[in-house]
Every structure is written in C-alpha cells, then in structure tokens.
Image: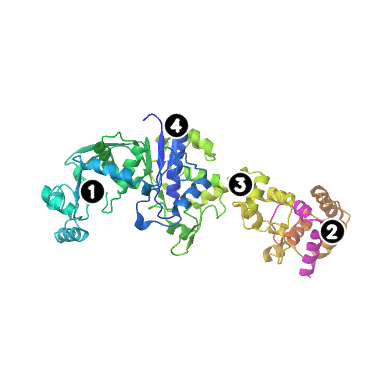
Amino acid sequence: MEKVRVRFAPSPTGPLHLGGVRTALYDYLFAKNQGGEFVLRIEDTDTARYVEGAEEYIEEALEWCGIIPDESPKKGGKFAPYRQSERRDIYDRYTEQILKTDYAYIAFDTPEELDAIRAEFEAKGDVFSYDNKTRNRLRNSLALSEEEVQKLLDEKTPYVVRFKMPVDRILNLEDIIRGKTAVNTNTLDDKVLVKNDGMPTYHFANIIDDHEMEISHVIRGEEWLPSLGLHILLYEAMNWEAPQFAHLSLILKPEGKGKLSKRDGDKFGFPVFPLDFKDPATGIVSKGYRENGYLPDAFINMVALLGWSPADDKEILTLEDMCKEFDLHKVHKAGARFSKEKSEWFNHQYIQLKSDEELLQILKNTDLDLSAVSDEKLVKIIGLMKERATFPKDIYENGKFFFEAPASYDEKASKKAWNDETSAVLGEFAENLTNTEFTSESIKQAIHDYAENKGLGMGKVMMPLRLALVGELKGPDVPDIMELIGKEESISRINNAINNFK
C-alpha cells in the first residue's frame, strides 16, 4: 500500500467522547502530513445499542472541529457505502470465503448451553473460555460429524461463526507507538466473527472494510490492543496484507488515575463531548465544548497535545501547523492527564489571537441580546475586555457596566473609595464634564486637571469615579469606559452614586 489511507470508525451508540475526537484528529493529522486520505466510516452493526441522531452528531462534531473527511457516508467516495449496515452483501461474501479455510467454524451452542458450561467451570474454581482447550467438546462443526452439522443447518438451527485460534503459536506484533510485543495464541479465545443474525462482529467487519477501503494505517485506542493478535491472524486467514497499527493511550482523569469519563466532567465542571448532546431516551442534555464557549481551534489545539509533543514543545498550533508537524512516533505511550485549567488557558490564548471583528461575529452568534448596541461600539468594548476573557461571553459578563448602570455598589470597594468628601468632589467634577469633549484623551485630561486644581491625588477622583460607573473597582481605564457609555450616561451614573451614598 503506497498511499496513506486512514479511517475513523465510530459506532453511533452515543455522543463522541473527547478520546474519540483525539483519535479522529490524529488520524486526520497523520493523513494530511503524509499527503493521504482520511475516511469516516460508521460502524453501526450494534443495533441493540444504536442511538437515534448519534451519526449526525458525530458528523457535526467533526465538522465543528475542522476534521473534514475525504470520504464519508454524507460525502460518499469510491469505496461506498460507508455505513456497515449497508455492506451486508460484502460481509456475506467474505463469510463464505473464511469458512472455506481452516481459520473458522460454525458453532450452534445456545446461550443457555454456554451459561451451563460456564457455571460448571466456576464450580471448580476455573474460568470458561471458548478456545482450543474446550472447542472440541462443544456443539460446533469441529466436534460434530458432517451429517450432524448438515442436519442442524437443514433445520435452520441458529449458529455463529467463530475464529479457530491456532494452537501454541507465538505472534510477533508491531505497533508504531508501542514497538514490538509477542503473544501466545494459547492465551486467546475463539472470538465470534459473525453473529446468529448473519451480521459480522467488529472484529471481522472492520478487517473486511479496512481491506476493501485500502486502509494503510489503523490508529485507534489502546482498548483494542488485546485484539491485535486476532486481527493480524484474520488478515493471514484471508491472505491479505495487514495495515500498520498504532494504539493510542488513554486520556486520564484530572487526578491522573483511570480513564476520563462523563462522570468526571459532571464532578469537576467541564464537558467531555465536543457539542451538546440530548439523549433521545431520557431527554438529558450533556454539555459540549462548543456551547460552553470554547473556540474550535482552541479545543482542537488542546486535544492534540493530550498525548503528542510537537517540535520545541510549542503549545499554540493551528490545524495547518499540526498537519505539517504531526508524527505518530512522537505520540506518547503513557496516558495523558486532562486538565480543565489548561483547556481554559488554550481558549484564553485563542481569544487573544482573534481580531475584535472576529470576536464580534462570535458574540453575535451566542444567545446574548446585543441588538441595542451598535457593532462599532461592540468592537470597541471587545478591544477593551478581551484581554481578561477566557470565553467569548466573558467579554459581556465582565463588561456588563458598558450595557447597563450598576444597580448596587460593592461594599468593600465602597469603604475603600468613598468618604464624606467624595460626593462633593464627584458632584463638582460632573458639572465640569458638561463642557468636556467626550473622547478618552479629553476625559483623561479633564480628570487630571480637576485633581491638580483641587490639590487631590488622582486616586481620590479616579477610584470613586470607577465605583460610580462600574459598581466595583474593576474594568478598563475609566476614560475609555466614559467615552463608550457617553456623556449623558456617565453624568447620570455619577449622580446615582452620589444619591446612593447620601
């Protein structure tokens, strides 16, 4: 296989987890770095766990992240269809093929029969496994005569197709991230390849699809590492060239022990899904990064560094930068600990990188009602407030004083900024403002001149003035606030404060 082709193959059994996003991202980055192609395939053979709307959610999430497939169920492609549920005829053909080899057999054991054998083993303190030590005493085509097998088939007795694991073979396995390992086939069981409804299990279907779609590299989570031996043997059984494999480590809980879960997000107050997801069965909404105010490029940058280190340990990288730098050999073997604080840091950095005009469009796409304020004024407010913002809405929340007068005054700030003389000082200063040109520079000069003429320190004017305008001792430069809210509103707020502290 000369051309690099990778696939992300999620099951539509719920929302896309942070770990799934990272797998898709690493697939995409590797493909683009190598001039290859990135395929989205939906593995929807698990009908019992299928969740309505999950496939559409996956596609929308990847699109928001900027991880755009070259081929997918929505986009199509030369290896369509890209949903496993639509590939039944392909699987049937290969089921017939593998049953002609010495690598597969059919098994008629009922769940009740297997439960009885399991109980038998447990009574002796053993664990039952359907493998080379037990298969010849069970109800399958290896243990039964041809006549018995044919009779069961003629009676349309339900059966599954199992892989016949070779006896006592050492498999030398290779992983791009983890290097070389070896496994003895005696430790592996005879996995079901085709269920009794005729649909293949993950093990068989993904091998067939990867071969048919000419996948050159399989990048997936470490939970599939124990299945690598089986998958390599399946390629051998079908006489196909196996792709190269790379198994990604876990994304860990913030405390560092165990796999990150939705429960951790609920506990520590952060999302584990890219977008909001409403469970169609319960109606419960799980929060997503998009709706929590994360910018997609900040989110993707954060996800990329959960397990991969670019050159010079750079932290801020665009998707284009990542495509140029990504190297599977630099992906870490150890798990990556998730940090809510770091994810917020990334978002803050990307807000600073956005122009004020770009942030205006982002703010206007939120549920904030900004219709009463002109775009020109909003752009100026954004310029003053974005340095303090972690999320776009912080620009509004932290700068509410630009949109409405304070309804109360912070008690601690009031004690610090206001004394018996303050009302008279601010009242006289407000009178002077009527003849002041209302630009930031002119206002700044007016404050300076008034304080100097009255022999007051700048703090004696500036602090109570800020309190009157904001309600707290926070915010950007006072003259900038006054210019933006205007002369009439500035004087009104000063008078309101004076009346409040009478």
Q: Is residue 210 above or below residue 340?
A: above
Labels 2, 4: front one: 4
Q: Is residue 432 above or below residue 342?
A: below
Check disc 2 and report the residue beneath it: 429
Looking at the image, residue 136 sits to the left or right of residue 443; the answer is left
Q: CA distance from mark 3 to mark 4?
A: 31 Å
289 and 47: which is toward the camera:
47
The dominant secondary structure in magenta is helix
Q: CA distance from mark 4 to mark 1?
A: 38 Å
331 and 495: which is toward the camera:
331
Marks 3,4: beta carbons within 8 A: no
Check disc 3 and report the residue beneath it: 351
Q: Which residues are magenta?
A: 475-502
Q: CA distance from mark 3 to mark 1?
A: 55 Å
Type of amino acid under label 4:
Gln
Check if residue 53 falls in the magenta segment: no
Type of amino acid under label 3:
Ile
Upstream in sequence: badge 2 or badge 4 = 4
Labels 2, 1: front one: 1
